[in-house]
Image (cartoon, rainbow, N blue to C red):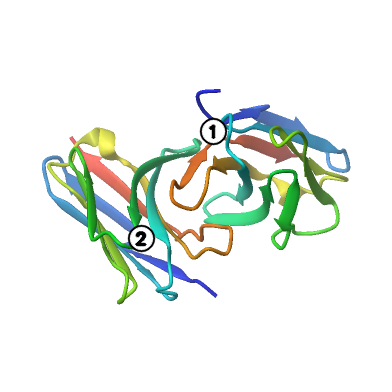
């Protein structure tokens, strides 16, 4: 059974810092892994999708890496901004029809 | 449509009443998923559809919960005899194959009073 852990659970930083959010998962036999952002009271917005054959994906100030064999992914946020404040969720896909979600990292970027 | 659409966005209902939540997936997406997120909790998988069939209903919490999908498109999640513990945000997502990931709707916030 896939279990997903995200560390830290919460993070508060001043604007401009570079951040690393960590995700670990127990079943490394995944097809892909998706990082999502969730704003309070809202649905989830997909940020990056990494296929199992890839090592990383980049979108603007975001970079996600995947080390499938060790069951780890990291989301790197460069030059953080107050608008980045949200909960970040990682979700590996093992082919059992569904993504399993971590409990997220709640990020607050202070102006 | 351009995105996954869920309705209503908010629903307040009295305990014991039935509710229906609707999801319109992205056109052409064959896979559709329902998740639930209780206050301060993670996402809980409820059910998965491939076309109109539901290969995985393992997450439905009780027999008060049911879901259907018609025409390979719209899905309805029905909760009968609602209880206060059913209060949560119900999220729908659709996808087109495992390569492409999910797209989520904005959710329906259900409050049972």
Left or right: where A57 falls relative to A5:
left
- The residue tagged 2 is A9
Q: Residue at x 52, y 52 (%)?
A: B40
- The front one of B93 and B89 is B93
- The residue tagged 1 is B106
Depth check, mark 1 against mark 2: the one in front is 1
Residue B37, x across and y down, in percent: 58, 49
Residue B48, x across and y down, in percent: 66, 52
Residue A90, x across and y down, in percent: 39, 56
- The front one of A85 and B30 is B30
Count of number-bearing discs: 2
Q: Chain of mark 1?
A: B
- The front one of A56 and A44 is A56
Q: Quadrant of the C terminus of chain B?
A: top right
| Residue B73 falls in image quadrant | top right
Q: Chain of mark 2?
A: A
Q: Residue at x 67, y 27 (%)?
A: B7
């Amino acid at each position: 059974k896939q279990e997903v852990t995200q560390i830290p659970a919460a993070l508060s930083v001043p604007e401009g810092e570079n951040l690393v959010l960590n995700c670990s998962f127990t079943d490394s036999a995944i097809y892909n892994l998706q990082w999502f952002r969730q704003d309070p009271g809202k649905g989830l917005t997909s940020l990056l999708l990494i296929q199992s054959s890839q090592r990383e994906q980049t979108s603007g100030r975001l970079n996600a890496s995947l080390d499938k064999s060790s069951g780890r992914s990291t989301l790197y946020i460069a030059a953080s901004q107050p608008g980045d404040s949200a909960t970040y969720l990682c979700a590996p896909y093992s082919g059992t029809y569904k993504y399993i979600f971590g409990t997220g990292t709640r990020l607050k970027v202070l102006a | 449509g351009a995105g996954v659409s869920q309705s209503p966005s908010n629903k307040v209902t009295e305990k014991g009443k039935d509710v229906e939540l609707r999801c319109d997936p992205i056109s052409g997406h064959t896979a559709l998923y329902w998740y639930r997120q209780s206050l301060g909790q993670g996402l809980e998988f409820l059910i998965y559809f491939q076309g109109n069939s539901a290969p995985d209903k393992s997450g439905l919490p009780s027999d008060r919960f049911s879901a259907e999908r018609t025409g390979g498109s719209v899905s309805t999640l029905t909760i009968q005899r609602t209880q206060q513990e059913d209060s949560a945000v119900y999220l729908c997502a659709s996808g087109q194959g495992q390569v492409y990931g999910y797209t989520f709707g904005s959710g329906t916030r259900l409050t049972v009073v």
